[in-house]
Image (cartoon, grey):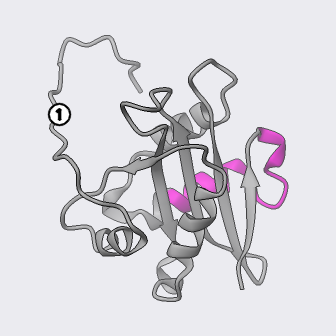
Amino acid sequence: MLDIQLIEKESDFNTISRDHFVEFLHTHLERFGDPLKEIHHCLDYAMSDEKSAGGFALAAFEDRQLVGALIMNRTGMGGYIPAWVLVYVAVDSACRGKGFGRTIIEESFKHCDGDVKLHVEYDNPAKRLYERIGFTNKYAEMRYTNSGSNERQM
């Protein structure tokens, strides 16, 4: 049975450290993950008090060991874009196949007051789980990388 902890602010990191949480995601997202700096940035956004920002994280434990993690961010665009984006979810590779991913994702929905979207690569095995939970493929995402953009450099 999973013990799932809601993390909405820095002081909620009492069972584990923020760094351990971020390193867990970085490790267990494997090739589908992002650099540590980007995961920290996502967590900063989730804990932000800024208008249209915010979100939360979930840490899932089995026998007091971290076995799953999730970060959910507000989009600030509810209505025409889903109000929430599930940015990261990972389960310890040694614990996959036990239903932990589904449990963590379904728990996250209880903390959302609107629709949820996520981005998943077509070859990610987790795509099947997301479809079984009820996510549908509405659009193909396309990106343009603006080499002259003023986006925050990491």
Q: Is residue 139 above or below residue 142?
A: below
Residue drawn where x is 47% and y is 83% of the image: 96
**Position of residue 136 in the picture relative to residue 51 (left or right):** left
Counting from the top left corner in percent of width and height, residue 77 is at: 45, 27
- Residue designated by label 1: 143
Neighbor class of circle 1 (other Cα within 10 Å; few <14, some 14-19, many 20+) is few
**Position of residue 112 in the picture relative to residue 144 (left or right):** right
Determine if the magenta segment contains residue 114: no
Counting from the top left corner in percent of width and height, residue 7 is at: 73, 49
Q: Is residue 143 above or below residue 39?
A: above
> What is the count of numbered marks?
1
Q: Amino acid at mark 1?
A: Arg
Q: Nearer the viewer, residue 18 or 109?
A: 109
Q: Is residue 48 above or below residue 152?
A: below
Q: Nearer the viewer, residue 25 or 79?
A: 79
Residue drawn where x is 37% and y is 68% of the image: 130
Counting from the top left corner in percent of width and height, residue 154 is at: 41, 27
Residue drawn where x is 58% and y is 52% of the image: 22
Which image quarter holds the N terminus?
A: bottom right
**Position of residue 67 in the picture relative to residue 150 (left or right):** right
Q: Is residue 135 above or below residue 13?
A: below
Residue drawn where x is 67% and y is 34% of the image: 47
Counting from the top left corner in percent of width and height, residue 135 is at: 36, 61
**SS class of the residue under badge 1?**
loop
Task: Give the prevailing secondary structure in the magenta stretch.
Answer: helix
Determine if the magenta segment contains residue 15: yes
Q: Nearer the viewer, residue 117 or 66?
A: 117
**Position of residue 85 in the picture relative to residue 120 (left or right):** right
- Which segment did they paint magenta? 10-25
